[in-house]
Image (spheres, grey):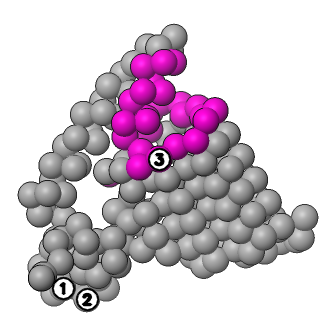
Amino acid sequence: MAKTEREKMLANEPYLASDPELRDLLKKAQNLLYAFNFSRPNENEKREEIIQSLFGAIGQNFEIQPPFRCDYGCHIYAKENLYINYDCVILDCNHVYIGRNVLLAPRVQIYTAYHPLDAETRRSGLERAAPITIGDDVWIGGGAILCPGVQIGNNTTIGAGSVVTRDVPDNVVAAGNPCRVIRAV
């Protein structure tokens, strides 16, 4: 039996984002995000319900500051004690796993999606997406960008403005463009 476009997407195979199933998932997520992003500051319970409906899974004790943006939401899996500051973008065309006690500063960008380098293939509409994993006790500084397929180790800090293009190990401070280990913790 042939794979669906969503199955291809989650397997990091070329897929068409224009697929009706993916468009429906996107529309559902965008409606939830609209309600979340335009909720009143005192509507904490409503915000929590929306995020619980949006994410694939989320642990206890989380706070996400609007505006927040993602593609589908259902591919984001977060454990307890998550804090996401303003203007975070998660392109969850593949799975995004977020560990315990994670802090995302303002304007963190997490991108699982990427496009072919070949222009002809790009014109065909095919895309790909690689999963991202963020370990436990991680702090990601403001404006940092996590590129497709990276893994951030436990007890690691990513400096503000960093562009993470490859895996970062446990127990380090890493920063820069491209992001590299600065020192051990």
User: Label 2 belongs to which residue?
Assistant: 118
User: Which mark sits nearer the N-terminus, 3 or 2?
Assistant: 3
Q: Position of residue 158 (x, y in %)?
A: 71, 60
Nearer the observer: mark 3 or 2; the answer is 3
Q: Please identify the quarter of the rendering in which residue 18 is found.
A: bottom left
Say which quadrant the N terminus sits in.
bottom left
Dot 2 falls on a residue whose secondary structure is loop
User: Label 3 belongs to which residue?
Assistant: 57
Q: Nearer the viewer, residue 70 or 145?
A: 70
- Packing grade of label 1 (10 A; few <14, some 14-19, many >=20) is few
Dot 1 falls on a residue whose secondary structure is helix
In the rendering, which numbered label is found on residue 121?
1
Please, what is the three-letter code of the amino acid marked with disc 3?
Ala
Please, what is the three-letter code of the amino acid marked with disc 1?
Thr
Q: Position of residue 65 (x, y in %)?
A: 53, 31
Tags 2 and 1 touching, CB below 8 Å: yes
Q: Is residue 55 magenta?
A: yes
